[in-house]
Image (spheres, rainbow, N blue to C red):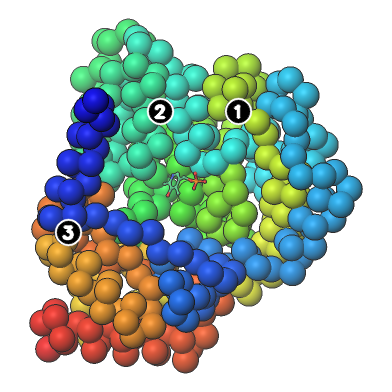
Amino acid sequence: MANPLSYLTAQLQEWRQEGTYQRLRVLESEAAAESRFDGRQVINLASNNYLGLTTHPKLREAALAAVREFGVGSGAVRTISGTMRLHLELEERIARFKNVEACVVFQSGFAANAGTVSAILGPDDHIISDELNHASIIDGCRLSRAKIHVFPHKDVNAAENILEGLHEAAGRKLLISDGVFSMDGDIGPLPGLAEAAEKHGAIMMVDDAHASGVLGRNGRGTIDHFGLHGRVHVQVGTLSKAIGVLGGYVCGSRDLIEFLYHRARPFLFSTSHPPAVAAACLAAFDVLEQEPERIQALWDNTRYFKEGLTGSGFDTGVSETPITPVIVGEAKLAHDLSKALFEQGVLATGIGFPTVPKGKARVRTIVAATHTRPELDRALEAFRSAGKKLGLIQ
Ligand SMILES: *Cc1c(COP(=O)(O)O)cnc(C)c1O
């Protein structure tokens, strides 16, 4: 009998031929500034572990203590019997940190976005969304069945024109942007967007996954960075990147959060975090407040590394954050550069279409607070040598 899944095999074969088939690199040590992947010790420029918290002793200890006291699982979804005291403590902690009334934690940032947009909007509503918003926002928009209006990247005027055009339209309007965009490392034009939302009575939502722990006082994110407290109704953050653990959260009014307790599907239908995850996240917020020098080191490293790349003649695009792309053009070239770097002991991922536009393929780098100067120098040397070999720089 013919295999009804044979079309998948054919597709994989096609991807292999066009060179876009992806083999998973296997991490054989801790996720740290230098890690072992596929048997090779490399400087890791491909991780979102901005502050080095994945291996911070306080987080480790908190997780171990929670395992000893509470076991390894919560046993149920939050609404049945899976709400532990630790979950509530974490939500209260984040709400205080973000200077909002309340917070709900999801299993991931992906679940937070997809679960929230689809819960608060329906088919009669309108979403005005930046074209480069994260996939989890796009999925949430689709699940809501609201009408989706995409505006060109960071184009506040275009967003405002869409809102104006919807002036007479029935239904609610949601204006949504990433705080920091994950492929280019640029910052969303939040003051302009917040003003447009206010003018047109739209809900303002920001996904701060890459800004949490990176921008704003002690890593409070882009809303704090721009001084927009009270003007963004729905703030999403992640616990999986700079926080170093796993999870996502939504911050806002008490009623928004209680509504999500009742209607957000990942909250209702998927089991809550193990106690170790909640405990480690709680410890991470202590670290953000007690060790601001980590964020300082992150930004010092960012400036140093960016200057090294541009000084060597690489095109780093429009980055304003620790996410620094090295834009090379064709996808094959990005993958070749990534491979050449790995041979020289540097891990940085090649990214091509459809994740980024055709002709804008890149190797994406993210430095961490925990990279040392010698490590960054070695990484820069690898970029120079590989870049020359591939004809990217002189
Ligand atoms: C990484 C990311 C997410 C998803 O966060 P996870 O916690 O990894 O699921 C959501 N939005 C943006 C902008 C991201 O970069």
Q: The N terminus is located in which quarter?
A: top left
Query: Which residue is disc 2 drawn over?
Result: 140
At a point 52% along the width and 85% down the height, the residue shown is: 372
State the SS at label 1.
Answer: loop
User: On residue 270, which mark appears?
Assistant: 1
Does 283 sit above or below residue 171? below
| Mark with earlier residue (2, 1) | 2
Question: Where in the figure is residue 291, as x and y percent of width and height?
Answer: 69, 70
User: On residue 19, which mark appears?
Assistant: 3
Question: Where in the figure is residue 216, as x and y percent of width and height?
Answer: 54, 58
State the SS at label 3.
Answer: loop
Q: Name the mark nearer the viewer: 2 or 1.
A: 1
| Mark with earlier residue (1, 3) | 3
At a point 60% along the width and 58% down the height, the residue shown is: 244
Q: Name the mark nearer the viewer: 1 or 3.
A: 3
Measured in 3D between alpha carbons, the distance from the residue under mark 2 to the one under mark 1, in whole angstroms, is 16 Å
- Of 202 and 183, nearer the camera is 183
Measured in 3D between alpha carbons, the distance from the residue under mark 1 to the one under mark 3, in whole angstroms, is 36 Å
Q: Name the mark nearer the viewer: 3 or 2.
A: 3
Instruction: Residue type at mark 2: give it.
Output: Gly
Question: Where in the figure is residue 162, as x and y percent of width and height?
Answer: 23, 26
Q: Residues within 10 Å of mark 2 (few under 14, many from 20)?
A: many
Instruction: Residue type at mark 3: give it.
Output: Gly
Measured in 3D between alpha carbons, the distance from the residue under mark 3 to the one under mark 2, in whole angstroms, is 31 Å
**Ligand 1 has an atom within 8 Å of the beta carbon of the residue at disc 3:** no
Q: Quadrant of residue 328?
A: bottom left
